[in-house]
Image (cartoon, helix red, strand yellow):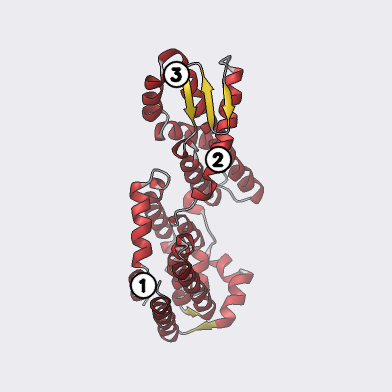
Amino acid sequence: MLGLASLAVFTLTAREWGEMTHQWWNSATYSHILLIPAIVAWLAWERRDALARIAPGGSWVGVVLFAVAAGLWLAGRASGLNLLAHAGAVGMLQTAVFALLGARVAALLALPLGLMVFLVPFGQEIVPPMQAITAKLAIALTHWSGVPAQTDGIYIDTPAGLFIVAEACSGVNFLVAAFAIGVLVCFTAFDGWARRAAFMAASIIVPILANGVRAWGTIYIAQSQGVEFAAGFDHIVYGWIFFGIVLAILLGGARPFFQRTPEEAGLSVEEAVRHPLVIAAEQFGGRSAIVFPAVLTIAAVAAIAARASGG
């Protein structure tokens, strides 16, 4: 039933999945998302022994959440806001698991289901402020290194030439990828919320600072080697190689504070059964054979509404 419901969702939201896949494959900002499906599958596979001890059952809470996700998709379609439509498409897959397999299964799969949020391409909204931050960091380091420079917003004028912190240099790709990895590490390596919060803060701050250093390094090298050499060096060394080094430093610094291995992540069966939210949701449990047509009906109604709205 979950397979059929997922097929129905993919059919309904084929346009959104096509758009998202195009962005994953063709945009450097979102290329890291290509790894997310494999990570989600791996995390779910690690829970196989615990899942084998749970009898799946339907959940009307999951059905309500599925309807909310379908409404979000419909609102995105009708308004032309791709972010909403994409979030709704992913949300319907997440909530279908909850609706058809029940609260206990959803609790055991909370991490892989939650990580599916990162299938949605987002981050373009913060490109302008990231450009401004990168420019300020770069100009500060440029002055500190003794290179005379003047700045006007994202434009940095130096003796070697005029540099522009373009959208591709804003560091949004680094930041979004580091944020996704940060969430994964937080819930697979740490038990306490204090350490999780500290690592998430580092996952945001370190890529921003590192991108400022990257921009400054390009400017600094250009002063002695020329702009063309600096541009080529930036593309070769300061791309994902640079990000890989930064990520290794970030993870290496946090490694001594890890509290568990990825195989130990997530709730145990006993913890899932006793969890207050699971107990509350199970008050609204139902047979999957009844919940299944309800899910398909919601998907069908959403499809009809989308066609009627011209979306």
Label 1 sits on what residue type?
Answer: Leu
Place residue 10 in its image quadrant. Answer: bottom left
Label 3 sits on what residue type?
Answer: Ala
- The answer for how far apart the CA atoms under marks 3 and 2 are is 22 Å
Identify the residue under disc 1.
12
Position of residue 73 in the picture relative to residue 284 (left or right): left
In the displayed structure, 76 sits above or below 156; it is below
In the displayed structure, 279 sits above or below 227; it is below
Element under disc 2: helix
Identify the residue under disc 2.
130
- Image point 66% across, 47% down: which residue? 194
Position of residue 107 in the picture relative to residue 289 (left or right): right
| Residue 93, horizontal then vertical, whole percent | 42, 68
Please name which of the two marks, 3 or 1, marks the residue nearer to the observer. Answer: 3
Label 2 sits on what residue type?
Answer: Met
Position of residue 119 in the picture relative to residue 202 (left or right): left
Please name which of the two marks, 1 or 2, marks the residue nearer to the observer. Answer: 2
Position of the N terminus by quadrant: bottom left
Q: Dot 3 surroundings within 10 Å: few (below 14), some, or many (20 or more)?
A: many
